[in-house]
Amino acid sequence: MKLTITFASTLFLTSAILSASTKAAELTPFTAMKAFDAKGEKEFTAQKIASFKRSFESVDGNKNGFLTEKEYISNSPHFRGHKAGARGFLFASDNDGDGRVSKAEYVMNRIVTDEAKEIYTRIDPNTDWKSIPVFQWKMKRIAFEQSAYFSDRAIATQIFTRMDANKDGVLHLPEYLRVYGPWARAGLPKEAIDGIK
């Protein structure tokens, strides 16, 4: 049997291959979490997750099982007196949009954001992150996209482009977390971030 390759069949095969490779590189929450090698609560011991729960309880001043912005500003050692930071944290944690944060929402947010910050430092291991206040962390596009942390440069570029909200070529930690959090909640299995070990 003789195989005949025509221009039309070559064009069809090339188109099919390009289409398949484009789909493989499509950026979704799942592909982003895979690119970040996110593990959710597998990154944390049961004791660490229990410490997130204790932290919630120490900030819940009226012990009603929910945090309000006022409680968080007044009682949290991280955000005491920093309204913008407290609002940002609460907005990111309030998964059901009721204006307050339950213990489950708080723990989920801590799992997601604590792992996200750890990944951020691994992307650019040449920076001394401990010497920089956490809310001043920033990373240039080239450091992010060329990082050995990512096996797929095209996905890294897509991730950076989506995360760099102000398009200044620098990925500030709050920009990163603002996108990473929703991606983690959508792209990781529920049991990986629910705080139940």
Image (cartoon, rainbow, N blue to C red):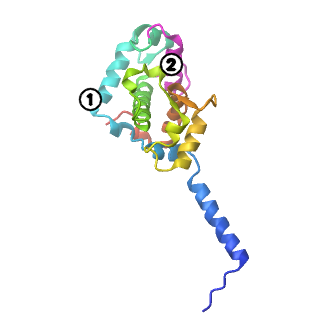
Residue 126 in percent (x, y) is at 40, 34
Q: Residue at x 65, y 68 (%)?
A: 14
Residue 116 visible at all: yes
| Residue 20, quarter of the rendered image | bottom right
| Side of 187 where 44 appears, left or right | left
| Magenta-drawn segment | 80-101
Work out which quarter of the rendered image holds the C terminus and state it: top left
- Please give the label number shown on residue 145: none
Observer-nearest of 146 and 54:
146
Observer-nearest of 77 and 55:
77
Residue 186 visible at all: no
Q: Amino acid at mark 2?
A: Arg
| Residue 127, quarter of the rendered image | top left
| Residue 15, quarter of the rendered image | bottom right
Q: Which residue is mark 2?
A: 100
Residue 109 in percent (x, y) is at 44, 28
Residue 116 inside the magenta-drawn segment = no
**SS under mark 2:** loop
Q: Residue at x 30, y 24 (%)?
A: 51
Relative vertical location of residue 10 with respect to residue 57 in this rendering, above or below:
below
Relative vertical location of residue 97 with respect to residue 30 in this rendering, above or below:
above
Relative vertical location of residue 154 with respect to residue 131 in this rendering, above or below:
below
Work out which quarter of the rendered image holds the N terminus and state it: bottom right
Choose mark 1 or mark 2, whichever is in front: 1
Q: Amino acid at mark 1?
A: Gln
Ranked by sequence position, the earlier of labels 1 and 2 is 1
Q: Residue at x 42, y 36 (%)?
A: 119
Q: Which residue is mark 1?
A: 47
Residue 32 in percent (x, y) is at 51, 43
Q: Residues within 10 Å of mark 1 (few under 14, many from 20)?
A: few
Observer-nearest of 71 and 13:
13
